[in-house]
Amino acid sequence: MKDSEERDPLQLLGGTALRVYLYLLRHRDPVTPRELQRAMRFRSVSTAYHHLERLLRLGLVEKRGEGYVARRPSGLLSLYVSIRGRLVPRKLVEAAALTGAAIGYTLANRDPLATAILWLTALLAWREYVTLARLVSRMLEASGD
């Protein structure tokens, strides 16, 4: 198996290709190269087509008629959830929810031990989020267009 076949698709995407993929994830309907060119402000349709074909080869999109549709994320991209058209790390959502619960529990003057455990859980979730964010950032910096 080739090295590129063993790597996570996120590692194989450069900044522009990743932005194209994220754009496609936010749109449920097929996006044509011309629509992508306008949305991403590419100078030519061929640039949009280049990125779409690259994503197609990586198995991240599929062609439907004249347009392209993103496939569900896999690998590291599966660690993200779409909220109001934006991809947000699942760990961020989890950490924020746990923090909100800890604040509510603290304000309600509940059991101190349970409150401490909830705060500890929230802090661990934030730690996991920061670790994931750093990992993804390093991967994106290491990958080129």
Image: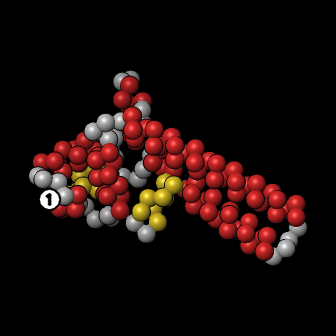
Left/right placement of residue 26 relative to residue 127 reads left
Which residue is at 17% across, 54% downward? 42
Q: Is disc 1 placed on a helix, strand or loop?
A: helix
Q: In the picture, residue 4 is in which quadrant?
A: top left
Q: Is residue 32 visible?
A: no
Where does label 1 land, which residue?
34
Label 1: few (<14), some or many (≥20) within 10 Å? some
Residue 110, image x, y percentages: 85, 71
Residue 137, image x, y percentages: 45, 43
Which residue is at 52% across, 47% downward? 133
Quadrant of the frame with the N terminus: top left
Which residue is at 64% across, 48% downward? 127
Residue 90, image x, y percentages: 55, 56
Quadrant of the frame with the C terminus: top left
Which residue is at 34% across, 41% downward? 13
Q: In the picture, residue 97 is in which quadrant?
A: bottom right
* Nearer-the-camera pick, 135 or 46: 135
In the image, residue 92 above or below residue 85 = above
* Nearer-the-camera pick, 92 or 65: 92
Q: Is residue 115 visible?
A: yes
Q: In the picture, residue 31 is in which quadrant?
A: bottom left
